[in-house]
Image (cartoon, rainbow, N blue to C red):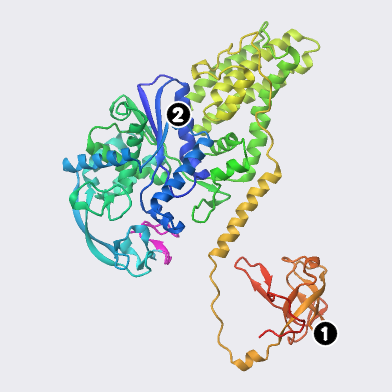
Amino acid sequence: MATDYKRYTITSALPYANGPVHIGHLAGVYLPADIYVRYLRSQERDVKFVCGSDEHGVPITIRAKKEGITPQQAVDKYHELIRNTFADFNISFDIYSRTSSKTHYETASDFFLKLYNDGKFIEQTTQQYYDEKAQQFLADRYIVGTCPKCGNENAYGDQCESCGTSLNATDLINPKSTLSGLKPVLCETKHWYLPLNEYEGWLREWIVEGHKQDWKSNVYGQCKSWIDQGLQPRAVTRDLDWGVPVPLKEAEGKVLYVWFDAPIGYISATKDLTPEWEKYWKDPETKLVHFIGKDNIVFHCIIFPAMLKAHGDYVLPDNVPANEFLNLEGDKISTSRNWAVWLHEYLQDFPGKADVLRYVLCANAPETKDNDFTWKDFQARNNNELLAILGNFINRAVVLTHKYYEGVVPARGELTDYDKEVLGVLQNFPMVISTYLERYRFRDALSELMNLARVGNKYLADTEPWKLIKTDPERVKTILNIALQISGSLNILMEPFLPDSAVRLAIMLERPFGKWAEAGAPDLLPAGHILGKPELLFDKVEDAAVEAQVQKLLDTKKANVLANAVAAPAKENIAFEDFSKIDIRIGTIIAAEKVAKTKKLLKLTVDTGIDQRTVVSGIAEYYAPEAIIGQQVSILVNLAPREIKGITSQGMILMAENADGSLAFVQPSKAVVNGGGVS
């Protein structure tokens, strides 16, 4: 496909180096970016794919404090984990850099100074919260209080995660510092601001008039909404001790605000990648594309472009194809709640199946709306699509060629109308897929790739070479030749989506998967070409593997319930005399059985040391009868007898209730003689 650009600079959002990468990050940002870059490379275009760890800002200091390490130790730890995980998942960055590098500090400082010296900033003195005990100004995330909108008592200084309202720290009711727990005080502090209001007219013309047709509707709509509300000056500095120091003598103790320094990380990464970095950032014939999630739209479409415009030397983004969010099993992915599928854990649990996750996340990508990842869908897409459609076609084409022709590509004979039709359809697929990729419609592009595999399967099913081999072996040569040409084109077209599988198929076909322009050709594999050994591209995902992942999530949800449980308030006081009437003893369960026609009840025989008595207890959902015989329990022995399901129950077994409703025996820590009193 023709292009008006000499080169491409592709960026994907810098992940915070405060934790591992999960599938939401992949589906929203890194996988579509990687597919697009691999496609551009296959088109033999000049492209640089840059990314790196965002290592500044409050999330880093919070993580470091939580783990009892320094911010530098925290970013070193997670930078390594994230970089290695991306590599294992075949995200093909040309460079994965970091914002704690010397190059980045210099680049960000120079950028700030250029704007400062050109008079692009305004200085403002404002009142901000200060922790007198910790002796520091508080970033928004170091302040919690009651949300004025919904009453959530744990809202942050920038947002309430309960109702989603954006806040200022001064909006909070009863604010307190997370550092000391004390109420902060307001103190004056000076900062430098980028006056976005001065760029409002230009941004409206550039976005609203210039990109309405080619930007995704969710991106355009969010930008227009922000502009329509009126833009305000935005601080570019903060009172923190972690970050790029503001390069001014009068700014001691201040750092560049992370939203200002982080996008400059794209530029500094490119500097580390190539001495010709200016071509990829300053030449008007370069196409700049940012891949991000929807929570970063404003930063990449309004704030960073305003910074670039103020600087004056850089190209502006041509497109910002932001995706929506991916949910997990019907619930929002949450790092704090550990409700996520972590990529490094997936790669450990499903070795050799990076492409399966790539396929599922692309096929279900949240391109226009939030979508949901489920393990059942993961299994179904692998078994019913990758395995049954793509893998099945490739396997039949290669295996039959080995079976009938010892792995040598047979020559085509006379073509039927059906053969000509299939070859004509094959020729069209590269352009169709390319058109979708150029428009950042990756789900549709992947769907067309699978449709080509369906064409191949239908062709084999309709022609039935396994039957014709006995009656018309010459016809079979033509059929398998065409099937192998489809396989060769699939090999080229699948590489951006399924790079591991493309390499393995190339080995089977004994041919490098080649460049995009070759796809669709009728003679990719010439007659006489010798194929490699056939193997299965995909295998079945079994129920047990999926059930284990679902159980892991259920265990996480249960742990969250327990961690966030709040004890019920105490009941009204009673007199000591009332308490002294209760007779609780230690007894041993000597027999247990389920009560017929009930789900919750067990009939227990308990040796109380006084006697052996029957107790009916509602614990059948938590204990199997045979598992509790011989266990010592606490039993209320002077409770009036009560008939339950026709059984006279003489007492009550004492149980402790967890936050999730599960029950546990109240037991002595070591053996006690039956009849021993509990006091």
Image quarter hosting the N terminus: top left
Q: Position of residue 466 (x, y in %)?
A: 77, 18
**Nearest the camera: 654 or 420?**
654
Task: Look at mark 1 in the image and give the residue it sits on.
Answer: 611
The percent position of residue 336, horizontal first and vertical second, equals 49, 55
Q: Which residue type carries mark 2?
A: Val
Going by the image, does 279 lie left or right of 44? left
- Callout 2: helix, strand or loop? helix
Residue under the image location 55 percent in, 73 percent down: 567
Visible residue check, residue 366: no
Q: Characterize the magenta stretch by its predominant secondary structure.
A: loop
How far apart marks 1 and 2 lie (CA) works out to 79 Å
The answer to whether residue 146 is seen in the rendering is: yes
Q: Which mark is residue 37?
A: 2
Q: Determine whether 180 is above or below 38 in the image.
A: below
Q: Is residue 417 left or right of residue 514?
A: right
Q: Does residue 576 appear left or right of residue 7 in this picture?
A: right
475 lies above or below 543: above
**How far from the left and from the top, in percent, is residue 13?**
41, 40
Q: Secondary structure at mark 1?
A: loop
